[in-house]
């Protein structure tokens, strides 16, 4: 089922369709993540698919952007994963995005924006009015992207400690 | 956090020049809107020009154009032309630094890091969106709105 079938055919070379992940997409998700992070973690992604692609789907969203280049062949251009969480850190229910990745050669073609808008709509449909994410300070591209989508610093400060 | 007047003017000038594609304005045009002297603003524009963020256009109707990429130029890129924003080591390696000195420096460095990360995460294009959103939510016309551009909420 297409979640946000707003194709940008006029502005991008490839039409993009955002839909929920399927089992058959996972090898492509693993491949994309490996190319981007240089770290293969198939077990992790299979576990994420079990938890976010199959369970509690009204509050968990594992979405992929699919490119349809010739009407027949399609492939995963990017993915976004998030869920509605409630009462952690005293927060009222809100949407959390914890993964976003786009094929490097497909960047600057609105793929991430399509994914971001699609998961925003899913969060809204799930009844929450706020979404959050966490980005490493030195992760320049994702930081610029989330900022460009209107995300601002929230009321929490992330704290950590080395465990001796 | 406070920014130098020159930094603020440079950011406002960048917003002015990127309010529409290829927009070209004189120092006097920008200075008039923000109530600052052309002399002061000219110095700011000179620094931005040396950094490749603006280019001057000579001749009748000349002025300045934005020369950077608004989607890649961050507030940090602009601010560090006028301010010392690098993480100050505060002589943390000094032999006579006390534990109190070291602890305070650690906290101050954390503040510096967050300030730098924030400025480095917001591009001129993102700032334009923020300006537009502020204008729409307040119903006010932004100083950087080009003539004829109207705030949506007032339509």
Image: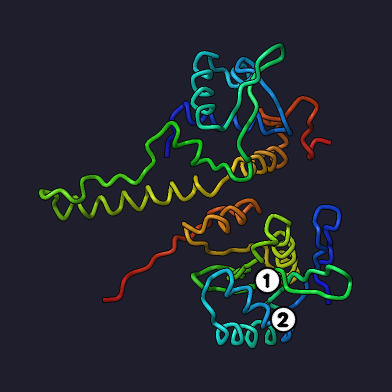
Q: Is residue A9 visible?
A: yes
The residue that mark 1 highlights is A79
The numbered mark, 2 or 1, whose residue comes first in the sequence reads 2
Q: Spatial distance from mark 2 to mark 1, Cα to Cα?
A: 10 Å
Q: Position of residue A49 (x, y in %)?
A: 65, 84
Q: Residue furthest top?
A: B60
Say which quarter of the image contains residue A52: bottom right
Q: What element carries label 1?
A: strand
Q: Nearer the viewer, residue B154 or B20?
A: B20
* Residue positioned 58% across, 70% down in the render: A98
* Residue positioned 58% across, 52% down in the render: A144
Q: Nearer the viewer, residue B90 or B63?
A: B63
Q: Is residue A94 visible?
A: no
The residue that mark 2 highlights is A25
Q: Mark 1 lies on which chain?
A: A
Q: Locate the N terminus of chain B and report the quarter of the image it occupies.
A: top left
* Residue positioned 50% across, 40% down in the render: B77
Q: Position of residue B115 (x, y in %)?
A: 43, 47
Q: Locate the C terminus of chain B and report the quarter of the image it occupies.
A: top right
């Amino acid at each position: 089922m297409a979640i946000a079938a707003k194709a940008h055919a006029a502005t991008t070379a490839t039409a993009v369709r955002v839909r929920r992940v399927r089992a058959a997409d996972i090898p492509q998700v693993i491949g994309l993540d490996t190319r981007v992070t240089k770290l293969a973690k198939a077990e992790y992604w299979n576990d994420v698919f079990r938890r976010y692609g199959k369970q509690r789907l009204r509050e968990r969203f594992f979405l992929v952007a699919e490119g349809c280049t010739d009407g027949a062949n399609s492939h995963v251009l990017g993915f976004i994963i998030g869920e509605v969480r409630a009462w952690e850190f005293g927060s009222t229910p809100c949407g959390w995005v914890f993964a976003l990745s786009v094929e490097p050669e497909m960047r600057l073609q609105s793929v991430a924006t399509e994914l971001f808008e699609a998961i925003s709509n899913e969060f809204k449909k799930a009844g929450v009015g706020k979404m959050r994410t966490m980005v490493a300070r030195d992760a320049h591209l994702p930081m610029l992207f989330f900022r460009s989508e209107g995300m601002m610093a929230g009321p929490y400060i992330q704290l950590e400690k080395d465990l001796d | 956090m406070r920014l130098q007047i020159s930094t603020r003017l440079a950011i406002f000038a960048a917003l002015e020049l990127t309010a529409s594609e290829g927009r070209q304005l004189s120092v006097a045009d920008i200075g008039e809107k923000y109530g600052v002297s052309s002399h002061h603003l000219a110095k700011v524009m000179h620094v931005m020009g040396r950094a490749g963020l603006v280019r001057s256009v000579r001749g009748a109707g000349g002025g300045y154009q934005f020369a950077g990429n608004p989607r890649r130029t961050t507030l940090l890129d602009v601010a560090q032309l006028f301010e010392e924003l690098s993480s100050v080591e505060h002589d943390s390696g000094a032999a006579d630094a006390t534990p109190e000195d070291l602890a305070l420096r650690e906290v101050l460095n954390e503040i510096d890091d967050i300030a730098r990360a924030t400025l480095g995460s917001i591009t001129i294009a993102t700032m334009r969106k923020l300006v537009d959103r502020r204008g729409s939510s307040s119903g006010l016309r932004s100083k950087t709105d080009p003539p004829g551009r109207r705030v949506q909420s007032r339509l």
